[in-house]
Image (cartoon, rainbow, N blue to C red):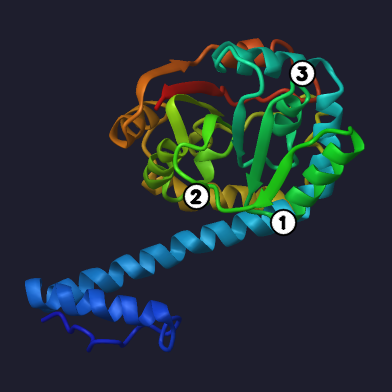
């Protein structure tokens, strides 16, 4: 017979915290409705949630280590041909008016935010890693551009509903443990007919390919490559093939006019240069 733990046991991280009260309240409610099996279910869900939060901590650690070198790479990208290619793709989908209010989620060192601020838009960039935000602020300051950068969880942006004309993102959504909830939250932040523009890839299922010589990532240590692979390993079981999965999640969140461009990879990476990405990326756009 399955032995079920008494109420409050096996919760070492929350014993005397507000979370403990919340969990115990949930357990009592489930007990009343479903009996002891419900208690086991709640405890399992809480352990799963703790693991998902650990992934975020891994991400912060990884990007903290990479922030200075990554910033230098993005500055080179900003000053080169690649920035024009990215801007052309963004402007294909952005509303055709001046001074849009745009949220760049997972801004990193500010690449999209800086590109769009240079076009006169009012841009806010958010990222979970403080060191990345520090680099973004410094780069924008060096270029004399006004952009607002904040440390914030991309799954739970704290802004008033209907604040933005557009949300943009690059290589972020594959890292989010709660992608469905994130899309729902993003939907609430857009104005009516506001647009989400998301560039990403199915990185958790990517095949390892040899990078060109003198590639921008050639100096990443084996330790960091190992951390990257470990994050993919932990995220892979809860993700379905993309971008098909994204389309389903966006529909559930309330988005419409959802479109996927899987040919954008060839447009952005027509040749194997220092910034070449061997994993085929897609662009997915959707209207609120």
Q: Position of residue 250 (x, y in %)?
A: 36, 31
Q: From this viewpoint, is residue 66 visible?
A: no
Q: From this viewpoint, is residue 280 visible?
A: yes
Residue depicted at 52% across the width and 22% down the height: 282
Question: Residue 233 bears which disc, if any?
Answer: 2
Question: Residue 82 bears which disc, if any?
Answer: 3
Q: Quadrant of the N terminus?
A: bottom left
Are discs 2 and 1 less than 8 Å apart at CB?
no
Q: Residues within 10 Å of mark 1 (few under 14, many from 20)?
A: some
Earlier sequence position, callout 2 versus callout 1: 1
- On the picture, is 24 further left or further right than 147? left
Q: Position of residue 249 (x, y in %)?
A: 34, 35
Are discs 3 and 1 less than 8 Å apart at CB?
no
- Helix or strand or loop: what does disc 3 sit on? helix
Q: Quadrant of the C terminus?
A: top left
Q: Residues within 10 Å of mark 2 (few under 14, many from 20)?
A: few
- Return the residue at label 1: 130
- Helix or strand or loop: what does disc 1 sit on? helix
Q: Using the image, determine if residue 6 lies above or below residue 181.
A: below
Earlier sequence position, callout 3 versus callout 2: 3
- On the picture, is 83 further left or further right than 45? right
Q: Using the image, determine if residue 48 lies above or below residue 98.
A: below
> In the current view of this chain or complex, which residue is farthest to the right?
142
Give the alpha-carbon distance from disc 3 to disc 1, as whole Å.
26 Å
In front: mark 3 or mark 1? 1
Q: Position of residue 6 (x, y in %)?
A: 22, 89
- Helix or strand or loop: what does disc 2 sit on? helix
Earlier sequence position, callout 3 versus callout 1: 3
Give the alpha-carbon distance from disc 3 to disc 2, as whole Å.
30 Å
């Amino acid at each position: 017979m399955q032995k079920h733990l008494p109420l409050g046991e096996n919760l070492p991280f929350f014993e005397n915290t507000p979370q403990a009260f919340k969990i115990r309240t949930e357990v009592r409610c489930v007990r009343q409705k479903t009996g002891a099996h419900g208690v086991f279910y709640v405890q399992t869900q809480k352990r799963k949630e703790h693991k998902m939060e650990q992934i975020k901590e891994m991400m912060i650690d990884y990007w903290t280590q990479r922030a200075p070198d990554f910033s230098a790479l993005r500055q080179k990208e900003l000053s080169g041909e690649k920035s024009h290619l990215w801007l052309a793709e963004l402007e294909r989908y952005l509303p055709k008016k001046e001074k849009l209010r745009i949220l760049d989620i997972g801004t990193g060192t500010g690449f999209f935010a800086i590109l769009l601020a240079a076009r006169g838009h009012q841009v806010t960039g958010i990222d979970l890693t403080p060191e990345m935000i520090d680099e973004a602020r410094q780069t924008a300051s060096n270029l004399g551009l006004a952009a607002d950068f904040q440390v914030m969880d991309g799954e739970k942006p704290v802004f008033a509903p209907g604040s933005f004309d557009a949300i943009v993102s690059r290589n972020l959504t594959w890292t989010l443990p709660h992608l469905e909830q994130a899309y729902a939250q993003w939907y609430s932040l857009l104005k009516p007919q506001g647009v989400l523009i998301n560039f990403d890839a199915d990185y958790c299922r990517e095949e390892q390919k040899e990078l060109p010589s003198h590639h921008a990532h050639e100096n990443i240590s084996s330790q960091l490559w190992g951390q990257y692979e470990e994050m993919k390993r932990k995220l892979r079981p809860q993700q379905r093939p993309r971008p098909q999965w994204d389309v389903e999640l966006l529909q559930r969140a309330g988005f419409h006019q959802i479109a996927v461009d899987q040919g954008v990879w060839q447009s952005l990476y027509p040749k194997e240069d220092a910034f070449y990405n061997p994993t085929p990326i897609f662009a997915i756009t959707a209207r609120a």
